[in-house]
Image (cartoon, coloured by chain):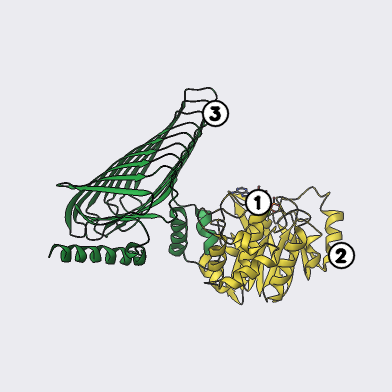
Amino acid sequence: MISYSIEKEYQGLVDAYEKAGGDRSTLLSKEVAKLVIHENKVLGVDGVNGIQIETKETETGVNIYFLVEEGAKILRPVHLCFGILPQEGLQEIILKVDAQDNSEVSVIAHCIFPNAVKVIHKMDADIEIGNNAKFDYKETHYHGDFGGIEVIPKAKITLGEMAQYENTFRLIQGSVGTLDFDFEVFSGARSVAELIAKVYSKKDDVIKIVEKVHLNGNGARSLIKTRIVLRDRARAEVIGETYGNAPYTRGHVDCIELVNGEQAVAKAIPIVSVTDEKAKVTHEAAIGSIDKRQVETLMTRGLDENQAVDVIVKGILR
Amino acid sequence: MLKVEKLQSKLNGKLILNDFNLHVNRGEIHGLLGENGTGKTTVAYLIMGVNNYQPTEGKIIFEGQDIAKLSVSQRAKQGISLAWQEPVRIEGLRVGDYLKLSGNNLEIEQTKRCLRMVGMEPAQYLDRDIDNTLSGGERKRIELASLLAMHPKLAILDEPDSGIDIISLPLILNGIAEMSKQGSSVLLITHNEKVVEIANRVSVLCAGKIIRTGVPLETSQWFKDNCRTCVHINEPEEEDKKL
Ligand SMILES: Nc1ncnc2c1ncn2[C@@H]1O[C@H](COP(=O)(O)OP(=O)(O)OP(=O)(O)O)[C@@H](O)[C@H]1O
Ligand SMILES: [Mg+2]
């Protein structure tokens, strides 16, 4: 009976994933490592050589320990799937990642909340990337159109020497609801960190994104890149902070918010600071309506204004 | 195909064009020569209807219809397009997709052909974005390829040669010749009298109006002899003080 219901939920998630444009075969394939969680239930865990995934269900979510063994180079991306299918629910994920020295992995996380009316998805992550390890994390959200969802991802990331960390957060489909995103990176010597966030907000969506990088090791580099498109009455505040605390560190904060709605409100607060004279941190932020010359250029090719705006929005969020 | 008649344009109260007349025939490459600041781009914008440019007087007749009140999209749908002097950059828009949309869902093989016609290797460019990672010259050549993809009845090329080095110039000229072979009429705007040699006819713009139209070699020689040293480049005459 229990396994039947798990099977059903699994199918439900896979269906929702496919409906949102995902490729169902990746979630069903036996050859990729994956972890599928619905509400506070672990529906499936498949490891591969070099990866250990341990889970513990709690009352409100799941605690996950994700280990990439020293020197392990994982060929295929690991898929994580977090979802809540009913209209209401709470999911608290506590994630501990330990990517050991010289390991390499890329993780693709699918967050699926197609019917949310009153849903909370929280993630608290503690991510440690070892020396010379590579960790690439891409998280894509599939939301319904109602907007009754709160997404609260928080992460603390520690990078060893020469570690490479890339985080891409995408919330383009459906209504955002409320997003409260807070990532903080502590960079070791000659490590590279890239934080990319792309969000398409509509209706009454409220977005707050805080991304901080502390370039603490010699020659550490970082890029914070944020792209937000706002429509209707959506509000967004983006805070990108980078601190050059060691010699030869290089950091850049790059934020674009496109406002395409008379009542939408966008704010960008870049904070850059250096405490070492040989560090260099730069920023650029652009907030405004869609560039008229871009629109007109596409119109000279026969697109009407709405189609042109669509192409520009898709581009910036790609 | 295009008849611009008695066009007048004022920008911020300043007279830029006055009594400007120009005919572009079906199938021809029509060169428009003028020094910096004579109003060439203004002409292009007025015909295309971009940048809020509206004639203060005169008519723009395209295929028998006055288009001066049409929107940019409507003009494009009628078959007019513009390769901008300084093409915009659009983040996240791939070269391949730009050409595809230019040609109203053009097939990939055709987009490759358009790139080759301006001397660009498709494999190297199709997946690049038309953002600021392209060099100025690359972006200009893609703008030309975009018009090849669109295949308009009338292609307005605003200085397709500026920012193009001596090695790439023949490629650009080849692209323009191909455009004409494909059946587009071309209004070729430039201040380079070498470039207009590929035109069928050439007009010279000075002091807000066309002051001469003729065959390329003779007209560009006249342009060189007269306009390079001329003093009243962008000062259109009011009605009472003619040239
Ligand atoms: N908004 C404006 N207000 C006032 N004058 C303007 C405005 N825009 C352009 N001009 C002037 O109009 C004249 C014609 O400009 P235009 O850009 O059409 O020249 P052009 O022939 O294309 O020059 P170039 O060879 O440099 O491209 C110039 O003298 C310019 O300074
Ligand atoms: Mg010009």
Q: Residue at x 29, y 52 (%)?
A: A176
Nearest-to-viewer mark from 3 and 1: 3
Q: Amino acid at mark 2?
A: Glu
Q: Residue at x 43, y 39 (%)?
A: A101
The residue at label 3 has a CB less than 8 Å from ligand 1: no
- Could you tell me which quadrant the N terminus of chain A lies in? bottom left
Residue on which disc 1 sits: B136
Res A180 seen here: yes
Q: Amino acid at mark 1?
A: Gly
Q: Quadrant of residue A313?
A: bottom left
Position of residue A155 measured from the top left corner of the image (x, y, whole percent): 32, 39
Chain bearing mark 2 = B
Residue on which disc 3 sits: A248
Chain coloured green in the rendered structure: A
For the residue pair B103 and A34, the one nearer the viewer reads as A34
Q: Residue at x 52, y 27 (%)?
A: A279
Position of residue B156 measured from the top left corner of the image (x, y, whole percent): 65, 65
Q: Earlier in the sequence, mark 2 or mark 1?
A: 1
- Could you tell me which quadrant the C terminus of chain A lies in? bottom left
Position of residue B157 measured from the top left corner of the image (x, y, whole percent): 67, 62
What is the CA distance from the residue labelled 3 to the residue labelled 2?
61 Å
Residue lying at the far left in this picture: please name it. A1
Under circle 2, the secondary element is helix
Under circle 1, the secondary element is helix
Chain bearing mark 3 = A
Res B58 seen here: no
Residue on which disc 2 sits: B218
Q: Colour of chain B?
A: yellow
Q: Residue at x 49, y 25 (%)?
A: A246
What is the CA distance from the residue labelled 3 to the residue labelled 1?
31 Å
